[in-house]
Structures are given as C-alpha cells and as structure tokens.
C-alpha cells in the first residue's frame, strides 16, 4: 500500500514475544507506547527500523534462545547499514541486562518489564548516543500510569493485566526477581481499560497476573473502603455491557478463596476453566519448592471448585526432576494427575536458574531420569486431554469465533473450556458467539457444525 503524499512516513516495528501471557500483553502495550512516535507493526525483522525482543528467563533454554536470536539480528543490522535499532525487553533484560550488552554490542537498548513505558525516551536518547542503554527500575505503578489509556484490540478477545510480580518465592522460580514484588492495579483503571475494550468489540477478557488470584486492588475511588479481591473484581466486570466471557490466569492454590470459587458457580460470564498449577504431587517436594500447601489441600480445592461448577476444565503446570525427587515422589505426581483428571497441562523438566535457592540444593536429578519422567507424565496428560476433548462430541456448545481457518470457508474459535474449535462458516461470523454441535475431537482441537448464530452483544 502506498502512503498518501501528506502522510508521515511510518517506521517499521517488529516485536518478537517469548514466554507467558504477561509478555504477550506487554508486547501489545509496547506497540501502543510506540504508535504516537510513528511506529507501525511489520511482519518480519528484515528491514524494520526497530526490533524489540521481549524475553523470558523461566528456563535455561528460553534464555539461550535470546542470544542466538540477537546474533541473527546483528547481521541484519549490519546489512541495514546500522539503521535498525535493537531493543531487548522482558525478564532476561531484567535478570541480566548488563550481560546482554556485554555479549551482544549490537543491542541498543535494554529495558526490564516494569520500564518499557520509558522506551520513547530511551529511543530518543539512543539516537543522540547519550545516556544509559539499560533501564531496569521497578516502578509498576508509574508504568501503568504512563501507558496510553486506550488500546487497539486484535479481535474479540483481550488480555488485561491486573496484577504483576510475585511474593511467593517458590525455590525454583526467577519470577519474583524478574518481575518484582506483587502489585495490583486499582479497580478504576482496570474498569476503564475493560470498558474501552468492550466499546471496541471485545467480548472475552482474560485477567492476567503472575498470581492473579492474589489480586487486592484499591477499591473504586468513589466507593472507597477496603481493597477488592479478584472475586469482587470479576463480579463487577461481568456487569460491563458487551463483556460476555471472563477468564483469569495464573492462579496460586494458596489464594483460591471461597468467594472466587463461588463466582465460578454464580457468575455466568465466568468461564468454566481454571489454570491452577500444582507443580508436584509429593508433599516432600512441594515443601522443598516452598509452595505452601500439600497435595491433599490441592485435591480439596479442586473438589470445592468442582462442587461450584461441575463441568469446569482444570489445567495445571508440572515440574519433573526437582532436586531430590525420587521415583516415589514422581509416582505421587502421577497419582495426583490420575485423581484430578486434567483437561490440559504443561509439564517441564526442572531447569536450575541462577540465584534461586533450588539451584543450590543437593541431589540434582540426572537428565535421562528427567527425560523418562517427563515422557511418562506427558503420555498420561495427553490421554486425559484427548479424553476431555472427546467428551464434548455430541454436545452443543457456545464458541466465540476468533479467526479464519486455513482452508476457504473454514472458521475457528474458542469453546468455554478454551479448546480450539474448527467449523465450516463464513467471515460474517467473525467476533460472534455461535452454537456448534461438536462432531469430532483430537488432542489439540474440536470440530463442530453450526447450529445457530447467537444474538449479537448489546
Ligand atoms: N505464576 C505461575 C507460574 C509462572 S512460571 C504459578 O505460580 O504457577 C510458569 C511455569 O513454569 C511454572 O508453573 C512452572 O511449572 C514452570 N517453571 C518455573 N520455573 C521453572 C524452572 N526453574 N524449571 C522448570 N520449570 C519451571
Ligand atoms: Fe514463580 Fe511460584 Fe511466583 Fe509462580 S508463585 S511466579 S512459580 S515464585
Ligand atoms: Fe517468562 Fe517472565 Fe513470564 S520469566 S514466564 S516472561 S514472567
């Protein structure tokens, strides 16, 4: 497309996102922050004026990926005659910013996850080659205040960050160091963001936080009173016109309070899906991980959630091969998985992270044992996931249509249980809720047939 003669020339912005949904949200906000400066997204780093790598530090592999990617970008930057600006943001930037600049001099800017609102100022400084290239201050409140108040959503679903940072200090995890202390946004700001999104056609929101159910945000200014819990926030957001589906992620078992559990049963917008990571089924390992609960306490929470909403899909994360994990500990994890029966779960081999207490523990588990355990766990989880998906066959369920399929005449969307669903439809159904009868299912998706298009949102 050629620009109108009087239009300002746009600068190409390429953002690569690694890691969790929080980073996906941050990348969108980075785009918003840069828009007033004339940056427009492009699909590839080649030829871009600014490339942002939004990084993840959670496991060693994730971190190493950043350095190999930066090597490639260096060559592209040289090919551009040095015109390309390279910025590294996110959790690796926070954890080892100075190391990044040392290992890859082609990097122009390094900003931690609580400092990316300062990008415009830092780009200006970089172009004059003055000032610091590294910004890793923790000022989450200032960040949220500085971000643009409106957003351009991509379709009918959106992430909304409501809580950041973590005070739990699980012994394996870098997040408390890369994201800082737990901070909740105030309710007024969250409501304003959700209203803005709803006005632009968003129907499903996912509230984000490292421990989103630890949310305790300042109450609305006009109402005052005590901080609100996540349960209160969800009930309030469910009343905003146009918002038909609410999800939240990721939760911690210790913060699963009665009111939030009850909301799953009494708030229709609350989707029947709960991602509640447990990491291990062994009390000994849970203790060494500093998770603050036992396997039976977790079983009890899931039983209460299922009592509030019988069809709820339960998801989790697992780590195998934590230091000192024996065959018996691993078997306790397998037993917990059999007991809970998960809809979906993510499992990882323990990765020692510099600066975390677990990295200093004795009895690291050999790689081949970790591999064997991971394979056994994933085989069980795959069976459960396939069975959960196949259990939808024959049911008619509401699906939010989020995009076009690969083939002509094919559309796809999301079930209430966060499953991907494909069906034969038309583009007119995009962003709408449709009822689909599920006719087939596999490990990763469902196939449906259109029954009816539901009423459009008011
Ligand atoms: N806040 C979330 C999870 C954040 S990290 C929670 O408390 O559950 C996402 C997942 O990465 C974790 O649930 C855990 O399963 C995994 N993870 C974190 N640190 C890890 C490590 N050092 N090695 C392997 N997996 C890890
Ligand atoms: Fe990491 Fe534990 Fe905090 Fe989750 S709760 S982010 S696993 S320290
Ligand atoms: Fe990774 Fe940081 Fe998220 S370490 S998982 S991007 S909070």
Image: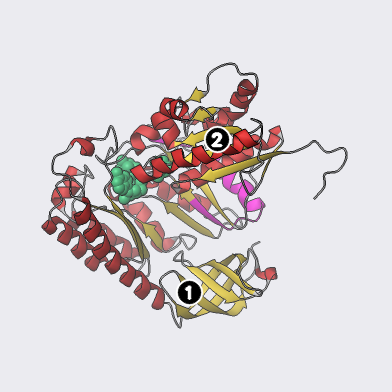
At x 32% / y 70%, what residue is drawn? 384
Q: Which residue is mark 2?
A: 74
Q: Nearer the viewer, residue 146 or 75?
A: 75
Residue ranking furthest to the right: 5
Helix, strand or loop under label 1: strand
Q: Spatial distance from mark 1 to mark 2, Cα to Cα?
A: 42 Å
Looking at the rendered image, the disc whose residue lies closer to the viewer, 1 or 2, is: 2
Label 1 vs 2, first from the N-terminus: 2
Q: Nearer the viewer, residue 432 or 402?
A: 402
Q: Determine if the magenta segment contains residue 205.
A: yes
Q: Is residue 427 above or below residue 205?
A: below
Q: Which residue is mark 1?
A: 446
Image: magenta residue range? 182-206
Q: Determine if the magenta segment contains residue 189.
A: yes
Helix, strand or loop under label 2: helix
Residue 216, given in percent of the width and then of the height, sits at: 40, 39
Q: Is residue 382 above or below residue 240?
A: below
Residue 115, given in percent of the width and then of the height, sits at: 51, 29
At x 22% / y 60%, what residue is drawn? 372
Q: Is residue 350 above or below residue 98?
A: below
Asked whether residue 192 is in view, the answer is: no
Neighbour class for label 1 at 10 Å: few (<14), some, many (≥20)?
many
Q: Tell me: is circle 2 under 8 Å from ligand 3.
A: no
Image quarter where the C terminus lies is bottom right
Res 134 label:
none
Q: Tell me: is circle 1 under 8 Å from ligand 1.
A: no
Q: Quadrant of ligand 3?
A: top left
Q: Nearer the viewer, residue 233 or 63?
A: 63
Residue 347, given in percent of the width and then of the height, sits at: 31, 56
At x 61% / y 33%, what residue is drawn? 78
Q: Is residue 39 above or below residue 370?
A: above
């Amino acid at each position: 497309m050629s620009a109108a003669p009087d239009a300002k020339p746009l600068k190409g912005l390429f953002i690569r996102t690694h890691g969790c949904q929080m980073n996906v949200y941050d990348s969108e906000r980075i785009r918003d922050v840069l828009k007033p400066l004339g940056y427009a997204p492009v699909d590839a780093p080649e030829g871009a004026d600014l490339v942002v790598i939004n990084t993840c530090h959670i496991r060693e592999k994730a971190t190493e990926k950043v350095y190999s990617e930066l090597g490639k970008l260096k060559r592209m930057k040289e090919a551009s005659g040095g015109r390309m600006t390279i910025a590294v943001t996110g959790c690796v930037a926070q954890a080892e910013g100075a190391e990044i600049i040392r290992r890859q001099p082609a990097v122009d800017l390094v900003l931690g996850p609580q400092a990316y609102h300062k990008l415009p100022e830092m780009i200006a400084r970089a172009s004059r080659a003055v000032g610091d290239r590294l910004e890793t201050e923790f000022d989450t409140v200032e960040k949220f205040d500085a971000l643009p108040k409106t957003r351009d959503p991509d379709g009918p679903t959106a992430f909304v960050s409501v809580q950041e940072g973590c005070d739990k200090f699980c012994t394996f995890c870098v997040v408390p160091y890369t994201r800082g202390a737990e901070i909740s946004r105030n309710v007024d700001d969250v409501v304003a963001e959700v209203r803005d999104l709803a006005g632009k056609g968003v129907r499903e929101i996912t509230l984000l936080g490292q421990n989103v159910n630890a949310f305790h945000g300042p109450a609305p200014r006009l109402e005052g009173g005590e901080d609100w819990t996540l349960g209160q926030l969800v009930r309030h957001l469910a009343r905003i016109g146009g918002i038909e589906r609410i999800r939240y992620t990721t939760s911690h078992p210790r913060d699963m309070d009665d009111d939030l559990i009850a909301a799953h049963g009494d708030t229709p917008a609350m989707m029947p899906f709960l991602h509640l990571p447990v990491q291990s089924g062994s009390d000994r390992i849970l203790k060494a991980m500093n998770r603050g609960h036992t396997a039976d306490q977790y079983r009890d929470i899931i039983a209460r959630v299922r009592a509030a909403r019988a069809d709820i899909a339960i998801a989790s994360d697992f780590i195998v091969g934590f230091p000192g994990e024996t065959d018996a500990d691993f078997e306790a994890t397998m037993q917990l998985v059999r007991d809970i029966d998960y809809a979906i779960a993510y499992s990882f081999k323990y990765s020692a992270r510099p600066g975390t207490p677990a990295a200093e523990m004795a009895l690291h588990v050999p790689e081949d044992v970790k591999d064997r355990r991971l394979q056994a766990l994933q085989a069980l989880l795959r069976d459960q996931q396939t069975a959960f998906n196949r259990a939808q066959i024959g049911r008619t369920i509401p699906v939010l249509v989020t995009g076009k399929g690969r083939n002509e005449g094919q559309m796809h969307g999301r079930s209430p249980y966060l499953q991907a669903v494909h069906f034969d439809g038309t583009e007119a159904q995009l962003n709408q809720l449709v009822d689909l009868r599920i006719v087939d299912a596999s490990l990763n998706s469902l196939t449906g047939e259109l029954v009816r298009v539901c009423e459009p949102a008011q």
